[in-house]
Image (cartoon, rainbow, N blue to C red):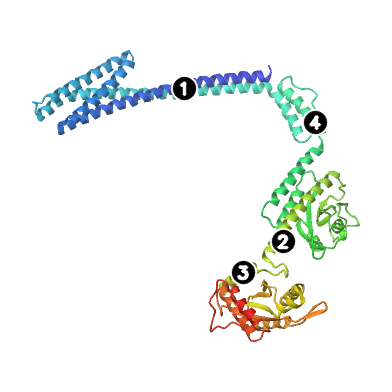
């Protein structure tokens, strides 16, 4: 017998048992639902009877006809419900419901005779009802209670019977299932053992596994199909697998480019993606070097598992040096075995290895180089090189986007001419410096530097000369400051300087004097020479204010005092007359400065 016949027999038996159990469960559920409905109707009848008795008591207390009518209506409802039950009852129950209906009629007749007898006193009415109505009501209540108790007992019996029956059915189903499973398993055990042994060989990657004979059942058919599948997998074109892996790697690289990562984090993620591509025979080592636009050299930007000696030696590489420099200079992918003479950077104890050095190109412009480590004797592979070229092309687009974002960020916060921080970045830095000085109870100084006679340079020599004066003045100001200080161009020929971590207030004066002296030196502009100078106002925190606006206003007024007394110098803010912070002191002070100029 074939396995499908055996399984069909077992499955059919199990389905039959389950259908039988489901049918009995449905019948049992319907019985329980009907019992619940009967119990609810009996409860409703009992409630109606109690309602009639309550209205009867109300009538005896208040002697109003409304209560009497309510009592009669309640008993009428009870009579109709009893009539319904009697019409639906079986033979042994009809007599009970007939008795209940008779009791209701007796109750109604007796109650209404008392109500309509106007000559009967209240006391007599009470006695009459106690004599005639109470026994009837009690008997009726007992009948309803008896029926409800019988229903509860039947429900409990039904539940007990159901539990026992289903327990027997469950045990029977388990026994039948065990017998069927044992029989089917025993009958196909040999075939399954052969199938598992063969499947284990195929799963381990042994697509050369073969079977000489096959069982004459479905397992045999399955084994034949598996053997053919192994042959097909063996002949499968490796390019399709590599193509899928390539798409996944490129997709992952593009997806990470949308994440809010820094340039270094993006490069580290890209390196990790490349090193984990399964079909590339790479060591778990590599690096990405980027081209520095300033000096035209490669600088190490990201690395993975590189030895410290390599990280130090390859931190900066000129074009043409070693494999990475040659790849960048030639703009093409280089492959190298171990011992290649082009591998110039070496150190004692370096493990044997080969290289793929892949240039990162964008429109024939080298943005960097990706270097990947190989086994010492790994030969060049066209599929690997093509894939690495695709990775480098994608990475070039990501680099350009990241660099564009950084340039946009730089332009948003820096002056185009002097590359100094602009007013917005100065405000942010000033706020942080004030917060740090307040928290550390330190001192800082803010200076407003205005170039003297700059307007005459623009008017006489032209705006190009004026731009050159601003650039040279920026360089001279920077020469007078520490790396921790900040100079920003606030607009036109005005600069602002923040000096932090001052030990003595006099130090700000020394810096201001040095700036004045530097800016007073002649500036050669081709055949012409420009002489400018500087008027500097200095405000100290917290001596001249604790808020940014107050300090800037104090420095502005101090600078104006220098202009007023003849320019070319510096002046500290006056602590005796501190200025009030203005909403826009920049719109107020320059008017006075123009008057001084």
Q: Nearer the viewer, mark 3 or mark 4?
A: 3
What SS does tag 4 mark? helix
Residue at 79% across, 80% down:
529
Q: Residues within 10 Å of mark 1 (few under 14, many from 20)?
A: few
In the figure, 282 relative to 195: above or below? below
Q: Which residue is mark 4?
A: 232
C-beta proximity under 8 Å, tags 1 and 2? no
Q: Which residue is mark 1?
A: 26
In the figure, 51 relative to 597: above or below? above
- Compute the Cα span from label 1 to label 4: 53 Å
- Compute the Cα span from label 3 to label 2: 20 Å
Q: Nearer the viewer, mark 2 or mark 4?
A: 2
- Compute the Cα span from label 1 to label 2: 75 Å
C-beta proximity under 8 Å, tags 3 and 1? no
Q: Position of residue 130 (x, y in %)?
A: 15, 26
- Quadrant of the image containing the C terminus: bottom right
Q: Position of residue 414 (x, y in %)?
A: 69, 67
Q: Which residue is mark 3?
A: 427
Using the rendered view, name the quadrant where residue 569 is placed: bottom right
Mark 2 or 4, nearer chain start: 4
For this view, does 154 lie left or right of residue 143? right
Q: Residues within 10 Å of mark 3 (few under 14, many from 20)?
A: some
Using the rendered view, name the quadrant where residue 81 is placed: top left
For this view, does 156 lie left or right of residue 511? left
Any mark on residue 407, and which?
2
């Amino acid at each position: 017998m074939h396995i499908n016949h055996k399984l069909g027999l077992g499955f059919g038996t199990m389905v039959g048992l389950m259908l039988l159990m489901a049918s009995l469960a449905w019948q049992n559920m319907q019985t329980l639902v009907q019992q619940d409905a009967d119990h609810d109707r009996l409860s409703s009848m009992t409630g109606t009877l109690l309602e009639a008795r309550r209205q009867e008591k109300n009538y005896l207390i208040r002697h109003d006809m409304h209560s009497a009518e309510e009592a009669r209506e309640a008993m009428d409802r009870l009579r109709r419900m009893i009539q319904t039950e009697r019409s639906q009852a079986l033979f042994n129950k009809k007599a009970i419901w007939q008795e209940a209906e008779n009791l209701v009629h007796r109750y109604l007749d007796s109650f209404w005779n008392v109500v309509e007898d106007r000559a009967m006193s209240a006391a007599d009415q009470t006695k009459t009802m106690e004599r005639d109505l109470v026994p009837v009501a009690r008997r009726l209540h007992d009948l309803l209670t008896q029926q409800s108790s019988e229903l509860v007992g039947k429900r409990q019996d039904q539940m007990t019977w159901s539990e026992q029956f289903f327990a027997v059915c469950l045990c029977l189903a388990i026994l039948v299932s065990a017998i069927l499973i044992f029989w089917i398993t025993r009958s196909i055990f040999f075939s399954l053992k052969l199938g598992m042994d063969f499947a284990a060989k195929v799963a381990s990657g042994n697509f050369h596994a073969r079977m000489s004979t096959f069982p004459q059942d479905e397992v045999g058919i399955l084994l034949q199909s598996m053997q053919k599948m192994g042959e097909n997998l063996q002949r499968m074109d490796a390019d399709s697998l590599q193509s899928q892996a390539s798409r996944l790697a490129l997709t992952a690289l593009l997806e990470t480019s949308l994440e809010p990562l820094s340039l270094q984090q993006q490069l580290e993620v890209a390196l990790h993606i490349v090193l984990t591509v399964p079909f590339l025979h790479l060591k778990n080592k590599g690096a990405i070097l980027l081209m520095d636009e300033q000096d035209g050299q490669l600088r190490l930007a990201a690395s993975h598992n590189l030895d410290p000696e390599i990280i130090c030696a390859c931190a900066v590489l000129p074009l043409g040096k070693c494999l990475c420099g040659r790849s960048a200079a030639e703009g093409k992918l280089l492959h190298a075995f171990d011992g290649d003479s082009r591998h110039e950077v070496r150190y004692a104890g370096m493990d044997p290895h080969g290289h793929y050095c892949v240039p990162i190109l964008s429109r024939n412009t080298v943005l960097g180089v990706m270097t990947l480590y190989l086994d010492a004797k790994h030969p060049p592979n066209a599929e690997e090189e093509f894939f690495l070229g695709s990775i480098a092309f994608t990475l070039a687009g990501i680099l350009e986007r990241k660099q564009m974002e950084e340039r946009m960020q730089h332009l948003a916060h820096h002056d185009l001419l002097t590359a100094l921080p602009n007013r917005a970045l100065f405000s942010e830095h000033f706020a942080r410096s004030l917060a740090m000085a307040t928290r550390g109870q330190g001192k800082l100084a803010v200076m407003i530097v205005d170039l003297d006679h700059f307007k005459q340079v623009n008017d006489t020599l032209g705006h190009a000369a004026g731009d050159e004066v601003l650039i040279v003045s920026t360089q001279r100001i920077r020469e007078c400051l520490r790396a921790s200080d900040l100079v920003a161009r606030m607009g036109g020929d005005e600069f602002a300087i923040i000096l932090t971590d001052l030990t003595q207030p006099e130090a700000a004066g020394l810096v201001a004097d040095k700036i004045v002296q530097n800016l007073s030196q002649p500036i050669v502009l081709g055949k012409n020479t420009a002489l400018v100078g500087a008027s500097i106002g200095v405000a100290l925190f917290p001596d001249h204010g604790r808020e940014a606006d107050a300090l800037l206003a104090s420095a502005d007024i101090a600078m104006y005092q220098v202009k007023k007394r003849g320019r070319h110098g510096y002046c500290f803010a006056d602590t005796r007359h501190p200025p009030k912070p203005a909403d826009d002191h920049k719109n107020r002070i320059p008017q006075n400065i123009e008057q001084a100029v």
